[in-house]
Image (tube, helix red, strand yellow):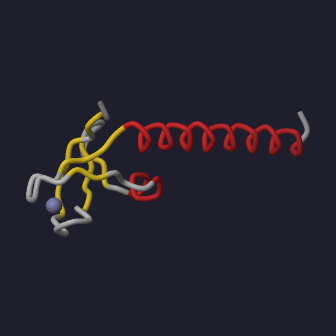
């Protein structure tokens, strides 16, 4: 395989990974919300907000409440 073809293949794989990651985040922001343990309000996070939020595990993110500015680990809750 020529070096150019190898490079193109790598780029295609990278683009695919980015696309899948984007779709995953898109789905997650559409169907989930957070509930603030401080003031009890529920809110949705923007795509970029969720993407850069610190991850503790699959179900918890370090997010800031838009209502009371409380910052902490909050569980990702599926919309009803
Ligand atoms: Zn709050």
Q: Is residue 27 above or below residue 74?
A: above
What percent of the width, then of the height, locates residue 67? 21, 66
Picture mark count: 0
Q: Which quadrant of the figure has residue 78?
A: top left
Q: Residue at x 31, y 54 (%)?
A: 54
Q: Is residue 12 above or below residue 40?
A: above
Q: Is residue 8 above or below residue 43?
A: above
State the residue lying farthest toward the top: 80
Residue at figure coordinates x 43%, y 52% from the top left: 51
What residue is rendered at 80% in x and 45% in y? 7
Q: Is residue 71 above or below residue 27?
A: below
Q: Quadrant of residue 6?
A: top right
Left or right: residue 26 versus residue 78 is right
Name the one closer to the observer, 42 or 6. Answer: 42
Say whether residue 71 is left or right of residue 45.
left
Q: Which quarter holds ligand 1?
A: bottom left
Quadrant for the N terminus, please: top right
Q: Quadrant of the C terminus?
A: top left
31 or 22: nearer the eye? 31
Furthest-bottom residue in this view: 69
Whole-percent x, y for residue 48 in the image: 46, 58
Residue 65: percent from left, percent from top: 22, 62
Q: Residue 68 in the image: state x and y as whole percent.
A: 16, 68
Residue at point 19%, 69% (across, down): 69
């Amino acid at each position: 395989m020529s070096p150019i073809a190898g490079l193109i293949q790598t780029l295609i794989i990278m683009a695919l990974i980015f696309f899948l990651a984007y779709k995953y985040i898109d789905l997650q922001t559409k169907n989930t919300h957070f509930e603030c343990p401080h003031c009890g309000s529920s809110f949705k996070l923007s795509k970029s907000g969720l993407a850069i939020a610190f991850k503790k595990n699959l179900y918890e993110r370090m997010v800031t409440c838009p209502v009371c500015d409380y910052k902490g680990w909050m569980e990702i809750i599926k919309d009803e």
